[in-house]
């Protein structure tokens, strides 16, 4: 298992080294996009957000410099007047699926691309404004979408989402993942990744995101994998560490484990053997970071709040 994972990880290292570029973000303006979009801005709830990339909205909408999008049903409109009328009569106050997780002001909904095709297509069009590599727009039926929201008295406000194939041959647990710009750098990206692995563990599977990852996606996943590995090392007291045990404990694909260990210099080859290194300075830095964030809202997944049955078990009922 280790040698196969190592060879795959080594082959990907050169390409992944290009992934360190992050776009600058803010609630009002986002810069750093690689392709100038036709649609310059969108209004989503109380936010006006600058688009990073173009998205294949129908021609009459794609020619607009600004789109108005309902934050609950994701219907897109050409003018503020139309949007105001829609908001007054739109019955939706949350995504059109099953609420499978709620803790404090956070809710996650599972939306079936087959049962809620229009919503999921609108979600993909919205996501393409902020994702360079996204190619899924209209063929949403084979996918499940997990929508992360913040809720208040007005409803459940979309924060971000990830999608996954209902039947992935390679056992990918994420096909596409996005946190909307107003909610970036608040721990929601890590929360979405954590949630995808929580679902994989409930299914009894090893999880891995669909490859290749976008630049921003690779940075987010690498940070997540590194932190989970450091947490594992802090809590693991045995003298021998194996990739297999890490994989089974965390639910990570061995390839992702090895590539992360290599990227951060936590694996060494010596006399025909490979050794996982517990880097004291990295462990100390991780503990300091955890202490500094002790007073902030927790974005970790509380498994006792997850009310979800894997699709394969639902089909048997």
Image (cartoon, rainbow, N blue to C red):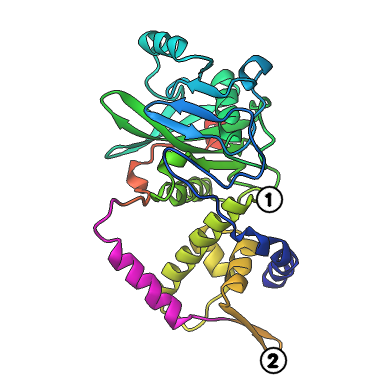
| Figure check: 111 above or below 26 | above
Task: Please state the extent of the stretch shown in magenta in the rendering.
Answer: 276-297
Q: Residue 285 appears at what percent x and percent y?
A: 39, 74
Q: Secondary structure at mark 1?
A: loop
Q: Is residue 115 among the parts visible in the rendering?
A: no
Q: Marks 1 and 2: CB-CB under 8 Å?
A: no
Q: Residue at x 58, y 44 (%)?
A: 174
Indicate yes or no whether the magenta region holds residue 281.
yes
Indicate yes or no whether the magenta region holds residue 221.
no
| Residue pointed to by mark 1 | 211
- Lower sequence index among marks 1 and 2: 1
- In screen coordinates, is 182 left or right of 212? left
* Disc ID at residue 147: none
| Figure check: 49 above or below 190 | above
| Residue pointed to by mark 2 | 271
Q: Residue 140 is drawn in which quadrant?
A: top right
Q: Residue 87 appears at what percent x and percent y?
A: 39, 13
What is the quadrant of the N terminus in the image?
A: bottom right
Q: Which label lies toward us, 1 or 2?
A: 1
Q: Residue at x 64, y 32 (%)?
A: 54
Distance of label 1 from label 2 (alpha carbons): 33 Å
User: As rendered, which of 281 and 65 lies closer to the eye?
Assistant: 65
User: As rendered, which of 294 and 57 lies closer to the eye?
Assistant: 57
Q: Secondary structure at mark 2?
A: loop
Judge the density around disc 1: few (<14), some (14-19), many (≥20) Cα neighbours within 10 Å.
few
User: As rendered, which of 290 and 315 lies closer to the eye?
Assistant: 290
């Amino acid at each position: 298992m280790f040698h196969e994972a190592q060879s795959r990880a080594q082959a990907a290292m050169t390409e992944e080294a290009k992934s360190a570029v992050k776009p600058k973000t803010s609630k009002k303006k986002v810069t750093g996009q690689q392709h100038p979009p036709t649609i310059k801005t969108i209004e989503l709830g109380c936010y006006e957000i600058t688009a990073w990339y173009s998205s294949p909205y129908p021609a009459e909408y794609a020619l607009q410099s600004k789109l108005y999008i309902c934050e609950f049903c994701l219907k897109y409109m050409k003018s503020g007047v139309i949007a105001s009328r829609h908001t007054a009569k739109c019955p939706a106050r949350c995504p059109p699926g099953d609420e499978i997780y709620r803790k404090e002001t956070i809710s996650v909904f599972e939306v079936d691309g087959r049962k809620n095709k229009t919503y999921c297509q609108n979600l993909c069009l919205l996501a393409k404004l902020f994702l360079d590599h996204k190619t899924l727009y209209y063929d949403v039926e084979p996918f499940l979408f997990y929508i992360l929201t913040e809720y208040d008295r007005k409803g459940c406000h979309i924060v971000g989402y990830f999608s996954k194939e209902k039947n992935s041959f390679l056992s990918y647990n994420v096909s596409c993942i996005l946190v909307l710009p107003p909610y970036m750098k608040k721990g929601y990206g890590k929360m979405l990744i954590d949630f995808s692995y929580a679902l994989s563990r409930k299914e009894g599977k090893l999880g891995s995101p669909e490859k290749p990852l976008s630049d921003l996606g690779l940075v987010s996943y690498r940070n997540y994998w590194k932190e989970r590995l450091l947490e594992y090392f802090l809590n693991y007291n045995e003298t021998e560490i194996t990739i297999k045990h890490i994989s089974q404990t965390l639910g990570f694909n061995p390839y992702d484990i090895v590539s992360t260990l290599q990227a951060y210099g936590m694996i060494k080859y010596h006399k025909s053997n490979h050794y996982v290194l517990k880097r004291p300075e990295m462990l100390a830095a991780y503990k300091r970071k955890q202490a500094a964030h002790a007073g902030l809202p927790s974005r970790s997944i509380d498994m006792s709040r997850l009310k979800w049955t894997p699709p394969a078990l639902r089909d048997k009922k």
